Image (cartoon, rainbow, N blue to C red):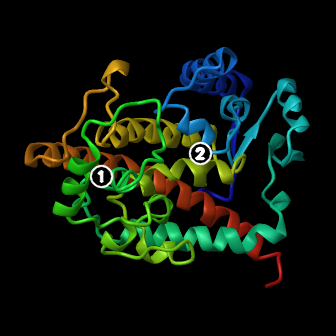
Amino acid sequence: MTSLHPTTLAFEDWNLRKTRHENRVAPFVEAHLARSSAGECHPIYDFLFEYYSLRPSLLLRWHPGVGIVLTGPEALACLAFPHYRERENPAGVSVCPQTFKIERLPFLRWLRQFLRNVQTRPPFFGCSGLHEWAMVYQTRNVRHPAWPLRFCADTIARIVESLPICCSHYDAFRFFTPAAEPLNRLRPTRQLADQFDQPGCLHANMDLYKWSYKLAPFTSSELVADAFLLARDIREIDMRASPYDFSNLGFAPIPIETTPGRTEYEGFQRSFHQRAIPIRERLLDVCETLLEQLESTTPE
């Protein structure tokens, strides 16, 4: 857990962290904004700015996170942002936990338990990425109509029907076609996400980005960026394993309709699972720190 005794950063140190963060995410933000200005759409990367609601300008903005005090006159500029306060001991500017809205406490408690449940649940690596296939099963209304499918509708149907569909993530399952829904062995719902989400799921690990920015600026921007870059890498694999053909964008398909393709996909799942563990632990640490400081002063 983050110490209740804050860490003080001199301007030289926190400005270096700020610059590193901006340099780290700027290429992805600038590429997205350039496409938007040109009226262009990227079927893989734009998802990170459209499905996930954090504005590009807010992804670029650096925050130290809870428990860090910024010193130097330059830190006073942070007071223009919500949740920052000037303090005396130690002197400087920091994100103030007491500004966390009381009405959001139930969400914070829920998120802590949700993250704990996912982190301690055994990972499942046998879904083979079939959720994207279930989204085009027996329908003409596909999500990316500008891009070709690798197979005709009948072949896609045979592939979907020949493999077990075990999707545990509601925000993937809810986009299944009506014909595909009964084929899923699980029935995840939004209300029961804490009982279904598991750490081998690509979408559950992508959503660490969502949870991290929902707690900003109490989460550090380094944590948000780590989660964003994980989500970006996962999104590439998610769509490479889909029935769409993105070869013209430089993304070779992962043929999950074959045994070698499913093995390749599982290898990526296992890698993402390992990358997600420390991100989830750090996010849990933020939840614990906020709750420890808030629950002692906030009535139930």
Q: In the shown orientation, is residue 59 left or right of residue 47?
A: right
Q: Is residue 54 above or below residue 126?
A: above
Q: Which residue is mark 2?
A: 51
Image quarter of the N terminus: bottom right
Q: Residue at x 67, y 28 (%)?
A: 60
Name the residue located 29 percent from the left edge and 55 percent from the top edge.
130
Q: Where is residue 288 drawn, in percent x and y? A: 61, 66
Mark 2 neighbour density, 10 Å: few (under 14) some (14–19) many (20 or more) = few
Q: Is residue 1 visible?
A: no
Residue 198 lies left or right of residue 193; in this view the side is left
Most extreme residue toward the bottom is 300
Q: Which residue position is annotated with label 1?
A: 129
Residue found 15% across the figure and 43% down from its top:
261
Question: Of helix, strand and loop, which one carries label 1?
Answer: loop
Please report contact status of discs 2 and 1: CB closer than 8 Å, yes or no: no
Residue 22: percent from left, percent from top: 63, 23
Q: Quadrant of residue 179?
A: bottom left
What amino acid is at disc 1?
A: Gly
C-alpha gap between disc 2 and disc 1: 19 Å
- Identified at 54% across, 74% down, the residue is 113
Could you tell me if residue 268 is visible in this image?
yes
Q: Looking at the picture, which amino acid does disc 2 mark? A: Tyr
Frontmost residue, 139 versus 119: 139
Give the x, y percent position of residue 67.
69, 50
Q: Secondary structure at mark 2?
A: loop
The mark nearer the N terminus, 2 or 1, is: 2
